[in-house]
Amino acid sequence: MTVIVDYGAGNLRSVQNTLDELKATYTVTDQANVIESASKLMLPGVGHFGQMMQAMDRLGIRSAILSTIRSGIPTLGICLGLQSFFESSEEAPDIAGFGLIRGAVKRFQATRDSSGKTFRIPHMGWNLLAPTRPCRLLEGLGSQSYAYFANSYYVPVSDFTAATTHYIHPITSVLEFDNVYGIQCHPEKSGPVGLRVVRNFLGL
C-alpha cells in the first residue's frame, strides 16, 4: 500500500488527486503503525521546514518514517518533502531534518544577471528539468521536460542529483539516493510530466 504522510501539508489534496487520476491504491495517515506498513511512502510538502519537522515530532512519527525509509521502502519527497531528507535548512537552522543526506538546504538570494534580468524570490512557475544521469523517476521523459516550481529554498547540486534546474544558478530538481527519491517541483501541478514522474514512482 502506498502511504501518504499527513502532517498538515498544504498540497496534500492535490497529491491525492494525482494518485486518483492514476487509479492508484493509497492511504493517508498520521499514524506511525500505518507508516511502518507502507510498501511505498510519500512525503508531500508546502510550508515551512521547521513547522514540518516539529509537526512530525508532535505526531510522534519521525522515527517511524526513518525506520521505514531505512528498511528499503521506496520513498518520494515532494518539494519540502525533498528538503526534509537533509540535516537542516536555512529556513529553520535550529530544527533538525531527517538527516538521511548530509548538508543543508539553502535560501535563494534575489539578484540580477548580466543582462539586468531580476530573479525574484520565490522561484515560481514553469522551468526545465535537465537530467544529469539516468533516474527511474524520469524514465520516459525527454531532455526538454518542464515542471512547475514554487520554492524560496533549494537543495544544492550533489552526487545524488539526478536532474538540475537553473534559477539564479543550478539547483537539484530531482534526487535519487538508494530507495530515496525527491523532486523539488510539484508533480501534482506539472501536467503530463508530473503524472509520469508519479507513475514511475508507483511502478518501482
Image (cartoon, rainbow, N blue to C red):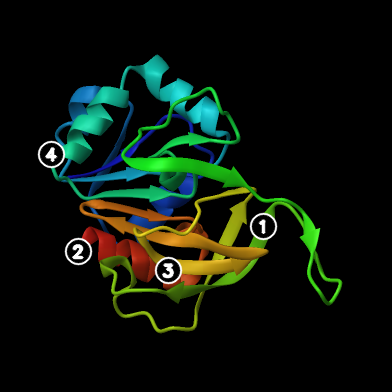
Query: Which badge, 2 or 1, is on the more N-terminal residue?
Result: 1
Q: Nearer the viewer, mark 2 or mark 4?
A: 4
Q: Amino acid at mark 1?
A: His
Could you classify mark 4 by the number of other residues whose Cα lies within 10 Å: few (under 14), some (14-19), or many (20 or more)?
A: few
Q: Where 153 sits versus 23, above or below?
A: above
The reply to whether residue 30 is in sight is: yes
Residue at which label 2 appears: 203
Determine which residue is flagged by label 4.
71
Please state which of the two labelled residues, at mark 2 or mark 3, is closer to the viewer: 3
Q: Quick one: SS at disc 1?
A: strand
Vertically, is 42 above or below 120? above
Q: Nearer the viewer, mark 2 or mark 1?
A: 1
Figure check: 117 above or below 13: below
Residue 90 or 136: which is nearer the viewer? 90
Residue that carries the numbered disc 1 in the rendered image = 123
The residue at which mark 3 appears reads as: 163
Residue at the image position 25 percent from the left and 32 percent from the top: 66
Q: Residue 125, how many percent across, how many down? A: 65, 64
